[in-house]
Image (cartoon, rainbow, N blue to C red):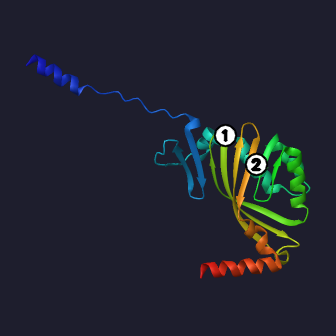
Amino acid sequence: MHSSANNVSELLKPTKIEPTKIEPSKIKLTKTSQGTELFTEQGAEPKSVAADKLANELVQPQIIDDFINMYQSLNKNSLHLLKQVYSKDVVFQDPLHKVDGLNDLTNYFANLYENVDSIDFDIQQVNSTSSQASIFWRMTYSHSKLNGGKSITVDGMSHLSFSEKITAHRDYFDLGQMLYEQLPLLGKVIGMVKAKASS
């Protein structure tokens, strides 16, 4: 009887459970219009986070906010702002070109923005870790030689790699939506091809 009582006592002892520790570098932050969610690298279910500020402090570096703010005000007269977020040896690539280094990037943007009458970026979603980010955006711009000078809307995504500043930037978007479909003759041809392909 004495032995059985001891066994029961052992079973009834409270078990101390250590909380699982997750390093900030193992966390992925996703910001959407519905709120902020956290994921672990192991693919755990997301948890809604009311304290957005705390989540941002954990995993979203200031460089991401600086990047977004810069593009909200970037134009042909403010290209000097590029050096605030890009490293000197940044590699930039989009469906049109690939450029190496901050100087070449500045020249590339100078050509892009030369005839742009207006441009605006609406940030749709930001997914970030401690060294990379994917930023989904909707760009609305007008160009005197495209679409009769009327506004053009393009959906795209920027993938960034960074440490203190951005070292690699690659843009993904539909080049036809941005450029080819806006040209008078070529745009009609592309429209006809799309209509036939979907019929």
Q: Earlier in the sequence, mark 1 or mark 2?
A: 2
Q: Amino acid at mark 2?
A: Phe
Q: Quadrant of residue 23?
A: top right
Question: In screen coordinates, is 120 left or right of 31?
Answer: right
Q: Quadrant of residue 184?
A: bottom right
Q: Nearer the viewer, residue 127 or 177?
A: 177
Residue denoted by label 1: 131
**Residue at the extreme left of the image, as rendered:** 1
Name the disc covering residue 4, or none.
Answer: none
Q: Which residue is rendered at x = 22% and y = 22% of the image? A: 10
Q: Residues within 10 Å of mark 1 (few under 14, many from 20)?
A: some
Q: Amino acid at mark 1?
A: Ser
Q: Is residue 87 visible?
A: no
Residue 77 position, x and y percent, is: 92, 55
Image position of 138 with respect to 162: above or below: below
Q: Which residue is rendered at x = 72% and y = 37% of the image? A: 163
Indicate which label's residue lies in the foreground, 1 or 2. Answer: 1
Q: Secondary structure at mark 2?
A: helix
Q: Is residue 41 visible?
A: yes
Q: Kindly indicate whether the residue at mark 2 contacts the one at mark 1 (C-beta within 8 angstroms).
A: no
Q: Quadrant of residue 182?
A: bottom right
Residue 191 position, x and y percent, is: 71, 79
Q: Which residue is rendered at x = 17% and y = 25% of the image? A: 8
Image position of 104 with respect to 8: above or below: below
Q: CA distance from mark 1 to mark 2?
A: 14 Å
Residue denoted by label 2: 67
